[in-house]
Amino acid sequence: MSARAARGGFLTRVGAMIVKEFIQLRRDRVTFATMIMIPLLQLILFGYAINTTPRNLPTAVFTHENNEVSRAILAALRNTAFFAFVREVKSAEDAEHMIRSGEVLFFVEIPAGFERSLRRGETPQLLVAADATDPVGSANALAALAGVVNSALVRERFVDAPGSAAFEIVQHRRYNPAGTSQLNIVPGLLGTILTMTMLIFTALSVTREIERGTMESLLSMPIHPVEIMLGKITPYVLVGILQALLIMGAGMILFGVPLEGSAILLAVATLLFIVVNLSIGYTFSTLAQNQLQAVQMSFMFFLPSILLSGFMFPFSGMPLWAQWIGEGLPLTHYLRMVRGILLKGSGFSDLTTDAGALVVLMLVAMAIAVARFRQTLD
Amino acid sequence: MSTAAAPVLDPDVVIEVEGLSKSFGGHRVVDNLTMRVRRGQIYGFLGPNGSGKTTTIRMLCGLLTPDAGRGTCLGMDILTESRTIREHVGYMTQRFSLYQDLSVRENLEFVARLYGVPQPEAAASAALQRLGLEGRGKQLAGALSGGWKQRLALGACILPGPDLLLLDEPTAGVDPQARREFWEQIHDLAAEGLTVLVSTHYMDEAERCHEIAYIAYGKLLAQGTVQSVIAAAGLTTVTVEVKGEAGQEAGRIARDLARDLSQRAGVDMVAPFGTALHISGRDGAALEAALAPFRSDERLAFRADAPTLEDVFIDLMRRSKDELR
Ligand SMILES: Nc1ncnc2c1ncn2[C@@H]1O[C@H](COP(=O)(O)OP(=O)(O)O)[C@@H](O)[C@H]1O
Ligand SMILES: [Mg+2]
């Protein structure tokens, strides 16, 4: 009926939508600043302030002998920065008193004949008493102790090889011998920050158009729900990539987070995770009646993500029902992947299950979003 | 709808709907509405606030699904082909619904791209020029005044070259000068062959339409040219002027007379205009009988008058309200 011959295709309309969203994003300075500030702020807060491995914990030492071995052990302990040697004590009672009064948190006793026993391979005991009222702080320091002492003794050639039971508190911790919490927290933050920002910003996108009245115009124009969704999601993919780069960059520079595995694999996993969260946020956007509801839904999703994904608490330590919920959360799978790639050097074959789970979650969310998208104002 | 005819495939009929109904929460907002709009017409859609104008327009362009009824828009079924209808219809919403945080030009380019207009930038430039908005291309749409917003919204509607315009109260809250220019533009567009359905609650705008429909409480009460609607109402109207008295006294007399007359059989409507009264009745003889006792009062001057569109609409509304009771 119309004289108009050339009608635009799918890509033209999605492109128009993307351009529009980008302009709006750019104009909304506060939102844009938030997206950049949230990752940095969180990283610094979690990385420095909320430190589950406190440093310079006051420690008393009681050495029965002064020789190479005891000096090496004390030097190694000092080097971990967990322990700050406040005082050398002359008796076990003094040390007990100092712990009880709270003057020190740790008490290290190197017993008489430790060196000789060690050289004879008699597995002597290194005594450590800890004030465990703050279990998190002491547990980490204690856990680090064994590894540190052992490697110091190996280095000084008092002991043959790492892992041989030369003395009693030997523990073998791989990936993070000093128990540096940032190494674990940075990948975790990468996941939680992406979850939060990606969810909320897309969750608002459709409800905002409805509240501002622009949805009526948009719906009266020839554009399909899938095109609207893709157009709204794409700009945020770039924002997500920017955030991920920021977090990874800061994590490497400030906290020395390693990248043991493939950078490309990390990028692919992160991209997939970003798209999953955007799809879920967009689904919320089509379900919510207004922007407030959309934000509430995002938080309802965000909280279990933090608590049950293995970010806060070790996943395998949770009850089975909680683990089942956790398996349904994208963050759980992403954390496994990103910790694996960053800290363990995992390859693609190690990650297929989690990648598959993310793909399934993404498809489910997108299907709900397109099905739920109201094409009319009814 | 037992005698529902096959859709008329007259290429000159642009909108043809029959028995459209829509309820919200059990409340009938549009009730069994039937209408027909011909190509190149400016069709005025009049009615008080809340009468169902917006709801009807939304059903025409597929934004709302009718509960009952059927119809075609540009020869396409409004129930099954609303996606295709959207490509050929420009819909200007009652509330400004372009993006306030996009500039004037960005809004126009967005619309051009969604409709697949070739060279969207050029199309936007052309539209800016046509709208007299050249200097304001970079301004945010949200920062425009009411009149300019309305101009921009209309410009965005006609940019993709639609065959039908649906304009929902486009002149609400716009100053008289801008209103006049707006109507000139509408007439130019109609002269080029565009069909325009425009809703309004300004009576004077009805006179600018080729045909009008009047809707109240969701029911279409009258349809046709302004003259035919007035004639069909069959109202007899008499104007009574109070003479030779001081303003205040004249006002008092007019008020007493109005109160007295409105009680009488045969008088259906009394509307004061300063010191004059506009008195209408459906039955000319009964109206005359009611007025007869006052004819001798020399303070009053009687004059036979033609009913205005407003008289007709108010009468129609009252009658339909009575029927609802
Ligand atoms: N989406 C909706 N939900 C519930 N009620 C509605 C909705 N849209 C319109 N209405 C009601 O329907 C009636 C007619 O509205 P509308 O079509 O907007 O009238 P008009 O445009 O003539 O002012 C009003 O009473 C309004 O409150
Ligand atoms: Mg309305």
Image (spheres, rainbow, N blue to C red):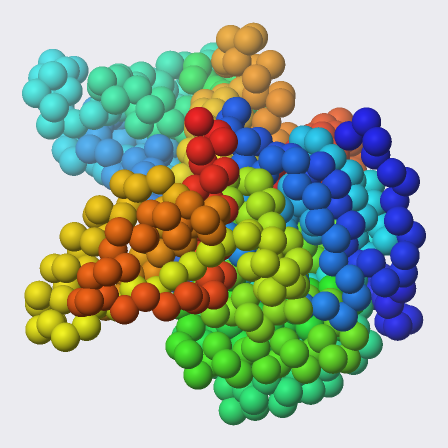
Q: Residue at x 82, y 76 (%)?
A: B118
Q: Is residue B255 above or below residue A71?
A: below
Q: Is residue B118 above or below residue A37?
A: below
Whole-percent x, y for residue B59 in the image: 67, 45
Closer to the camera in the image, A287 or A339: A287
Q: Quadrant of residue A20?
A: bottom right
Q: Quadrant of the C terminus of chain B?
A: top left
Q: Residue at x 35, y 34 (%)?
A: A53
Whole-percent x, y for residue A26 in the image: 51, 68
Q: Is residue A150 above or below residue A321?
A: below
Q: Residue at x 82, y 41 (%)?
A: B80
Q: Quadrant of the N terminus of chain B?
A: top right
Closer to the camera in the image, B72 or A95: B72
Whole-percent x, y for residue A76 in the image: 38, 38
Q: Residue at x 86, y 53 (%)?
A: B75
Residue A68 appears in view: no
Closer to the camera in the image, A248 or B75: B75
Whole-percent x, y for residue B309 in the image: 49, 61
